[in-house]
Image (spheres, rainbow, N blue to C red):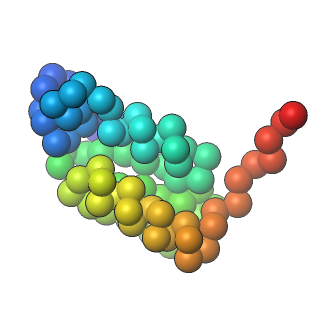
């Protein structure tokens, strides 16, 4: 469920070899559980509010996460200095 293998353009890697799933997780992993199942991208808030946010592309999911987060930020653990 986590990621497809190979060059499945648009699902988990783009033509330049970047990893959209990894990028989404790097940016949002403290606040959202993020996964891909086939062609469906999804995220769920770690604070338990709401249900799954679903999309059919990494860009769309990123936009939906940002909209959700701007509406009500997910509390994040304090960082250590």
Q: Residue furthest left?
A: 8
Left or right of residue 24: residue 60: left
Residue under the point 53% across and 53% down:
32
Quarter residue 61 falls in: bottom left
Q: Quadrant of the C terminus?
A: top right
Residue under the point 59% across and 64% down:
48
Left or right of residue 44: residue 6: left
Q: Residue furthest right?
A: 81
- Residue 46 lies, with reference to residue 25, above or below; the image says below
Q: Position of residue 75 (x, y in %)?
A: 70, 60
Question: Is residue 69 at all visible to an observer of this figure?
Answer: yes
Left or right of residue 13: residue 25: right
Q: Position of residue 44 (x, y in %)?
A: 47, 59
Q: Considering depth in this image, is 34 or 14 the residue closer to the camera?
A: 14
Left or right of residue 17: residue 67: right
Quarter residue 7 falls in: top left
Residue under the point 38% across and 62% down:
63
Question: Is residue 41 at all visible to an observer of this figure?
Answer: no
Q: Position of residue 73 (x, y in %)?
A: 63, 67
Q: Residue furthest bottom?
A: 71
Q: Quadrant of the N terminus?
A: top left
- Residue 72 lies, with reference to residue 81, above or below; the image says below
Q: Position of residue 50 (x, y in %)?
A: 50, 72
Residue under the point 24% across and 25% down:
17
How many numbered dots are placed on residues in this image? 0
Q: Considering depth in this image, is 29 or 20 the residue closer to the camera?
A: 20
């Amino acid at each position: 469920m986590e990621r497809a293998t190979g060059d499945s353009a648009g699902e988990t890697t783009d033509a330049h070899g970047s990893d959209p799933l990894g990028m989404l997780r790097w940016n949002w992993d403290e606040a959202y559980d993020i996964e891909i199942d086939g062609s469906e991208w999804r995220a769920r808030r770690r604070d338990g509010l709401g249900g799954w946010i679903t999309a059919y592309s990494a860009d769309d999911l990123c936009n939906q996460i940002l909209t959700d987060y701007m509406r009500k930020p997910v509390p994040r653990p304090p960082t250590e200095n």
